Amino acid sequence: MNRRGAQQYVVARPLYSEESFAQDHEKVYRPRKTMLDHVKQYFTCDAKRAKAACLSLLPVVGWMKMYRLKEWLLSDLVSGVSTGLVAVLQGLAYCLLASLPPWYGLFSAFFPVIVYFFLGTSRHISVGPFPVLCLMIGSVVTRLVPDEGSPMNITGFAGLTRDEQRVLVASSVSFLAGLMQLAMGVMQVGFVVVYLSDTLVSGFTTAAAIHILVSQLKFVLGLPVPGLSGPLSLIYTLEIIFRDIASTNVCDVVISLVIMGVVFAVKELNDRFRSKLPVPVPIEVIMTVVACGVSYAFDFKTRYGIEVVGHIPQGYEAPMAPNLHVFQETAVEAFPMAIVGFAVAFSVAKFYSVKHDYTIDGNQELIAFGASNIFGASFKSFAASTALSRTAVQESTGGKTQVAGLLSALVVMIFTLAIGFLLEPLPKSVLGAVVIVNLKAMLMQFREVPYLWRRDKPDCVVWVGTCLASVLLGLDLGLAAGLGVELLSVVLRAQFPRCSQLANVPGTDVYRDRKDYLDISEPEGVKIFRIPSPIFFANIEFFRTKLVEAVGFNPLRVLRKRNKALRMIRKLLKKGDLQWTSKGFRNSSCGPVPEDKSALEALEDLDRPTDFQDLPTRIDWSAALPAYIDAPRVALHSLVLDFAAVSFLDMSALKGLKAMLKDLIRVEVEIYIAACDPYILEKLHDCCFFDDEVQPSMFFLTVHDAVLHVLEKHPQAAEKSCAHDKVNTTVTVHLPEGGLRSRDRSAAGPETRF
Amino acid sequence: MNRRGAQQYVVARPLYSEESFAQDHEKVYRPRKTMLDHVKQYFTCDAKRAKAACLSLLPVVGWMKMYRLKEWLLSDLVSGVSTGLVAVLQGLAYCLLASLPPWYGLFSAFFPVIVYFFLGTSRHISVGPFPVLCLMIGSVVTRLVPDEGSPMNITGFAGLTRDEQRVLVASSVSFLAGLMQLAMGVMQVGFVVVYLSDTLVSGFTTAAAIHILVSQLKFVLGLPVPGLSGPLSLIYTLEIIFRDIASTNVCDVVISLVIMGVVFAVKELNDRFRSKLPVPVPIEVIMTVVACGVSYAFDFKTRYGIEVVGHIPQGYEAPMAPNLHVFQETAVEAFPMAIVGFAVAFSVAKFYSVKHDYTIDGNQELIAFGASNIFGASFKSFAASTALSRTAVQESTGGKTQVAGLLSALVVMIFTLAIGFLLEPLPKSVLGAVVIVNLKAMLMQFREVPYLWRRDKPDCVVWVGTCLASVLLGLDLGLAAGLGVELLSVVLRAQFPRCSQLANVPGTDVYRDRKDYLDISEPEGVKIFRIPSPIFFANIEFFRTKLVEAVGFNPLRVLRKRNKALRMIRKLLKKGDLQWTSKGFRNSSCGPVPEDKSALEALEDLDRPTDFQDLPTRIDWSAALPAYIDAPRVALHSLVLDFAAVSFLDMSALKGLKAMLKDLIRVEVEIYIAACDPYILEKLHDCCFFDDEVQPSMFFLTVHDAVLHVLEKHPQAAEKSCAHDKVNTTVTVHLPEGGLRSRDRSAAGPETRF
C-alpha cells in the first residue's frame, strides 16, 4: 500500500476537544476594536494626518513634483495631440447617442478633463464621453423631451427650444450623478464597485453595445426614427426601423459601409502589426477628414439629402444652474449612471495602474469624477467617464501623465473656439459608422457565453441574465436586475452543496467521502457528516433533510414515539398490567392493549426530553421491550459533524441547527462538531447557542479527535467496525495511560492488536 | 503541558499530497448524472409513477381513506363552526383593507376553501382572506380606481359603478396571482420560499402591520380618507388624517376604544389561562354580536352618523371572466402577491405539519392555492391565503382535517345566503378596531430588533432594511428591496472575512492563528495563510490585498525589478562592464552606471517569468549582487494556503487566484494548497486552472502534510525555526528512509534531536 521511499510521518499528541485544547494552550487576550473605536480613530486628527489628507485630495501636487520635464513632456505632447483628435471625433459621435446636438460632445471632452487633471489619481485614462453613459443620458433625455409629442411638464422648460430643454436635462442629470459620486467618495464607499463583477460588466456592456448598434442604425440608414426609452424600447425602435426601411437613404448606407469596411480593415492590420508599427494608424481621424472633404466638395447635404453635423457655434456658452425639478424626475436613473460611469473608469484606470506600477485610490477617483461632472455639467457638458479606445490611444502614443489629458483638452478647445466649422459638412452617418465599428470588442464578448457555460454555469446565468435584462428592460433597470441575479448566484452556489458522509481511510487520520473509496472504514453506530458550505437561511432546511437522510431516521418522530411509549408504560405500571423486574419488563395481563387516546391533550409534551422520573429505571431503548410498545430502535449512538467548511452562520442557521441538535440529543445520539472555526465558536458563545442540552464540550479539534473520543467511549463500536469491515488496518489500542493509538499497519509496533 | 491522564494518540502515516494520496487510494468511479439524465428521469413515465403523480395531485383521496369518522367528525364539526364565525367576521373586516364592499370578503372565505379541500396537503390551515394580501390588493385597487378622480383608462370599465370596477380589478389581479402560483407549482419551483427568511418575513409583516394600522385609522376615527397607493403613500395618508383630525367622529372613537379595550383584555386572559380553558373565549365574535345589537337598537347610523357595513345582498353573483387589460397593468404587483400569499400559508402549514407529524408538499400547495385563487376569482372573491389567527382557532378548537375547513365554508355560506342582513347595522369602526387589536403579535416583532442587533448585525440590517423599505415604498417594492438587502447580506458575510496567518502548535499537527497563542512556532521562510471563506468576485481583491500584506511584498513589483536587473546585467555583460566569475559577478568598470531607459519599449516583458537563458548561471537573488543592481530579496520560500473553508469559487476567483499564484511562483515562492475540498479540486481541473506554472502537485491533504513537505525540501527552515523561536518542542528528524517525524516532547524517543 505504501510506495517505496514515500515519506512517513508520525504525530503523537493528546486527544483534543476544543475545551481541553484551550486548557493546554492559553489564548492571548487580544482586545477587539469596537465600532466606536473605529469611528474615533477615523475622526482623530493631527497635523500629519491632515497634511496627508490634503495631499490625497490633490494628487496633482504629488505627481507634479516628480514630473520629469525633459523625458515626459515630449511624449505627453505627442499623446495629447493624438488623443485630442480622437476626442473631438468621439465627442461628436457619442453626442448622437445622448440625443443632443453634436457640439455639446466637445464640451464633455473639455471641462471634465480639466478638473480631473487636478483631482484624479490615474495618470493614463482619457476622461470624457463614454458611449454607454451617453446612451443612458440619451434615454433620460428622450423620456423627458421626446422627439414626438410635448415634453414633460417641467418648471424651467418654458421658453426653451427642444434642444435647449434637452441640454438642460442632460446637464442636470450629469450634475446629479456627479453629486452622487462626490457623496460616495466622501463617504468612502468606493468599494461598491466590487459588486460589479467581470461577468456582470461583460454582460452589461454587451447589452449596451446592442443598444448602441440599434440607436446608430437610424444614422447609418438615414432614417428619421424617434428616440425611445423605457422597457422594450429596443424592440419598438427596431419595429419602426423595419417599418420604414423602404425609405433608407442609399447614399448614407454606401458612405457608412465604405467607412466601416476601411476602418475595420485598418484596425485589424493595426492589431496584427502592432509590434512593428511605432503608433497605430489613426484611421478614424483620417477617414473623418476625408469624409468631411468629400462631403463638402460634392455638397452631399443638398445633393443627396444626407444629414450632416451642421452648424457648430464658435466658443463656449455661459454656465447655468441645474434644474431641481429634473433632479426629482431623474434621481432613480442618475444613480446607475454614477455607478456605471465610475466603475468603468476605475477598472480601466486600475488596468493601467497595474501595468505602470502606481497606485490609484478608488475613493479619490469617485471624488475626482464627481467634481468633474459637477463642474462640467455647470458648463453644459454631460457626464464623463472614460472610453477604453481613447485611453488606449493616449497610453499607446506615449502618454505619461494627465498632462497628456490636459493637452488633449486644449486640442478640443481649439476646435470649439476656432476650427469647428471644418466639421460642419461631416455626414452623421460617418459618425454612426465609426461608433459601430468601435463596438466590435464589446460585441465579441458574446464568445464568453459558451466558455462560461462549460466552466461555471452560475456565472453563465449571470452573464445571460444581465445581458437579456439590459437589452429588454433598458440599461438602468437591466443593471439592477443583473445585480440581483449576481447576488442570487452567490446564494445559489452555497444553497445546494454536495453533502457527504465521511469514513476513515484505514491507518491514517484522513476522512473522505465513504462512497468514493473502497478501502475505507466507518465505525459502527457513528456517522460523520460533512457540511461543505456556510449555513444560512437558504440552506438550513436542505441540511436538515440531508442529515435526516444520513442518520436514517427522523429524530423528532422517534422522540415522540418514545414519549408515547413511556406514557403507555407508566399507565400500564399503574394499572398493574406491566411489572418491572430486574430482568426487564414483564407483561402480567394478556388482554388487549388499551389504545392511547390522550395524544391530543398534551401534544407539546411529546417534544420534551424523555423523562424517566417516577419510573423504576431508565429504559434502554435498544433492549427488548414488550411487543405492543412501539418505540423505534436507533442504531446510531454518535454523530460527528465536520464544520471545516462552515465559514459563517446566520440567525436562521443558529436556530435551525440548535433545534436539529436538540432533537438528536433527546433521542440519545451524542453530537460532536469538529474543525469549527474559532471565530464561529466565539459567535456561538455570544449568541447564547449553548444550554443544558447543547454544550460547548461537543467541539473537537479534528474529525479524528472526535472519532477517537467516540471509540474510547464506545469500545464496541471500534471492535464491530473491524470485524464487520474486514479491513483490520485501523487498530485502536489502549495505551497504558488510557490513550488511544491508531497505527498504520506498515509501522508494526509492539502494541497488542485486537 | 499535558494534563495527567489525558488521552494521547499517535498517527503514523505517509506524508500525503493529493497526488500521492490518489496513488495509494484508488477512487471509485462514480458516474455523474448529467443534466440530460435528470431531464430524462424526470419525464420517464410508468404506471406506478403516473398513479403516484395523480394521487399527489389530489391529496384528498389519500387522507379521506384514513378518515376516522367516529373520532374526528365531531371535533371537525365543532372546529368548523367556530372557524366559520371567525371567518365571517374577518372576511368583512379584511375586505375594508382591500377597499372593497364588505360582503365580498364572505366570498373569499368560501370559494377558495372548497378547492383547497380537494387539492391542499395541509390538514389544519384555514384558507381565506389574509390581511397583508388584502392590503396589497387594496393598493392595486386604489391605484387603478382611486377614491377621487377618474379611474384608469381600462377597457371593460365602461358602464360599471366604482365598486364594480374595483371588484373587477381585485378579482382579475387575484386570478393572475393564482395563475402565477399554479405555474410555479407545475414548474416545481416551490423552493423559492426559502429566500424569504424568517428575518425578512418578520420585518415585512411588521411593516405590513403598520400599513394596516394606518389604513384602519380612518374607520376608527370615522374620517373620510381616500385610499392612496405607491411609494410614501403611508406618509401622505397620515398627513391627510392629521389635517382632518378635527372632524373625527367621537362616537366612532368611543366604540373603537371600548371594543379594543375589551378584546385586548380578554385575549390576554385567554393567553394567561390557556391551560385551564377548554377553548379560548371567542371574544371578537361576542363583541361583534353585541355591537350589532346595540347599533341596531340605538340606530347609530342615523343618530351619530356612523358608517355601518350596510346592505349585504343575499346570494352569490354570477361568475365573470378576468380582465386582460388589468392583467397587463398589474402583472408587476401580482407576482409579490402570489409569493407572499403562498409563503405565509406555507410557513403556517409547515408549523402545524411538524406539530401533528405529517408531510406537506410545497409544490402541491402552490398548485392548490393557484387553483383556489383562479376558481375564487372567477366568482368575484379575492386572493386567499391563510390568517394565522383563524388557523389557530381552527386547530385549537379541535380541527383534524380540511373537513373542518369545509364546514367553516358552509357557515360562511349560510351568512351569504340567509342571515347576512343581521350584520348590516355593524359599524365599520368595530371591524377596524378588531383588525387593529389583532395586529398586536405582528407589531410585537419590533422586539426582535435589539435582539438581532446584539446577536447578528447583518440579520438586523436585513430586518430594518426590509421593514423601512416596505413602510416607505409600499409592500411590493419593499419586498423586492428587502430581498435585495437579504441577498446582499449573504455576500457581505463572506466578503470581509478575518484572514489569519497560522502557525504550528508545537508537538502537534495543529495550526492556529499565530497571534492567538504564545507557544506557537512558525518555520522560517514559510507563511501559512488561511482563507476563511468561499472566494468569489466580491472578495478576491480583498484576499489579494491581505495576502500581499501577509507575505510582506508585492510579487509583481519584485518580478519586474528582477527582470529589470536581469536586463541590466545582460547589457553590462555584453559591454564588458561586468564579468561572471565562479565567485559571482565582478564589476570591471568603476564609471557611472548607465540608467535603464528601455523600460517603455517592453513593459509587458517585465511581467514574464525570469529568463536565465544566455546568462552564464541562474542568479541567486538572495546572494550579494553588485550594489547598483536593484533586485529585492525575498525572505519567503514557501507559502501554504489553507483552503479548508473555501466552499466554492467562481470564475473571477479562478482568474484572480491563478494570477496571484503565478506572480508568486515567478518570484520563486513555492505554493502549497492544503485541505482543499475534492469537488473544488475537480472543478479546478475542469476549468483548466493548471498549466506549466500552476500545477496540481501543489495540493496537499492537510496543512501539516504541506509544512512537513516544505521542511523536507528546505531543512534549514526547520533548524532556523527552532533556533529562532527557542521553543524546541517541534523537532523534525530524518528517519532512515528519509521521512520526517514530528514528536511531542512528552513522548521521548530514541531519535536524535537537533
Image (cartoon, coloured by chain):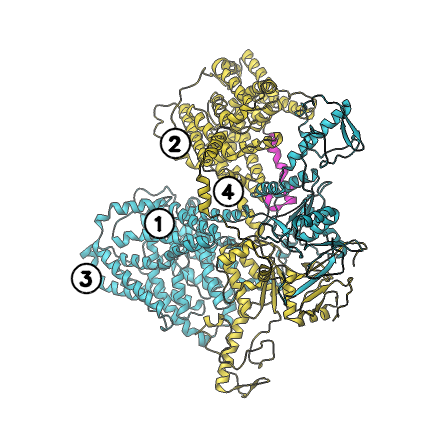
Chain colours: A cyan, B yellow
- Kind of residue at disc 1: Arg
**Real-space Cα distance between discs 4 and 2?**
25 Å
**Real-space Cα distance between discs 2 and 3?**
57 Å
Question: Which residue bears the numbered disc 3?
Answer: A298
Chain under disc 3 = A
- Kind of residue at disc 4: Ala
Seen from the viewer's position, the closer of residues B307 and A490 is A490
Image coords of residue A496 (percent x, y) = 54, 46
Q: Is residue B120 left or right of residue A306?
A: right
Question: Which residue bears the numbered disc 2?
Answer: B326
Image coords of residue A660 (percent x, y) = 64, 40
Give neighbour class at mark 1: few <14, some 14-19, many 20+ (Cα, 10 Å).
many
- Kind of residue at disc 3: Phe
SS for callout 4: helix
Q: Find residue A166 and name its label.
A: 1
Q: Does any portion of residue A411 appear in the rendered image?
A: yes
Image coords of residue B267 (percent x, y) = 64, 24
Chain under disc 4 = B
Chain under disc 2 = B
Above/below status of B423 relative to A256: above
**Real-space Cα distance between discs 1 and 2?**
34 Å
Seen from the viewer's position, the closer of residues A12 and A627 is A627
The part of the chain drawn in magenta is: B439-460
Q: Are marks 4 and 2 on the same chain?
A: yes
Quadrant assignment for the N terminus of chain A: bottom right
Question: Which residue is located at x 50 percent, y 42 percent?
Answer: B481
| Residue A578 figure quarter | top right
